[in-house]
Image (cartoon, grey):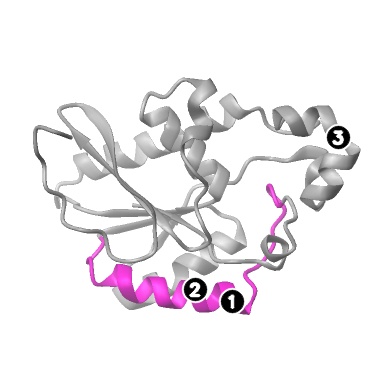
Amino acid sequence: MLWRHGQTAWNAERRFQGQSDIPLDPTGQAQAERAARLLASLHPDLIISSDLTRATSTAAPLARLTGLNVVLDKDLRERHGGAWEGLTDTEIRERYPAEHASWTPPDGEPTVVVADRVATALLRIATAVSDDVRAVGLAVVVSHGAALRLGMSRLLGMPEEAFGALGPLSNCSWSVLGLRHGRWRLLEHNAGTLPEPVILSDDR
């Protein structure tokens, strides 16, 4: 399960956060508490989080409810935004029109690098889960909107030009990935309620 952090003041102001370490605002804290109560009912076995404060603060209520420790992984950090960090979308559009059109932050992290970094982290987590002698069933990964979307896209085998096909994750919403017959499948996307039971049929 891939869980985006709760709202921050910069989210509300539509500022590019990147790897700037911005904390949750009161709304984000409430979102994390509510989501944690839902996710705890699924009895997760593992919680892994980006080491940025907004992600660890989102993971904290779930850790408290489940008694699990939060494992930090810096490879789950958000895309480094270079000169864009701290700027609003309007400011980026006005100051960097060409880069905005291609969504390429100056001195920032290229899209494919983010996709590869996060997908590698997700695969590492999945391998740890499958190799665990306790037969871990559900890992909750707490990270960031662009990082999760790009990492998912790479795991699902989407070409770079199709990465935008997956819509953005809302604050404190999550997506669910599953592995079936050696291939990753997107089972839930941008959910804010408990996942529905998965019914496999030939028309999927």
> Residue drawn at (48%, 34%), measured in percent from left and top?
165
Secondary structure beneath disc 2?
helix
Amino acid type at mark 1: Thr
The answer to whether residue 105 is seen in the rendering is no
Q: Please report contact status of discs 2 and 1: CB closer than 8 Å, yes or no.
A: yes
Secondary structure beneath disc 3?
loop
The answer to whether residue 7 is seen in the rendering is yes
Of labels 3 and 1, earlier in sequence is: 1
Within 10 Å of the Cα at label 1, are there few (<14), some (14-19), or many (20+) other Cα atoms?
A: some
Q: Nearer the viewer, residue 118 or 181?
A: 181
Check residue 96 in the rendering and tell me which mark sits there, or answer none.
Answer: 3
Q: Mark 1 points at which residue?
A: 27
Q: Report the magenta residues as a range.
A: 17-44
Q: Name the residue under label 2.
A: 31
Within 10 Å of the Cα at label 3, are there few (<14), some (14-19), or many (20+) other Cα atoms?
A: some
Quadrant (top left, top right, bottom left, bottom right) of the C terminus: top left
Between tags 2 and 3, which lies in front? 3
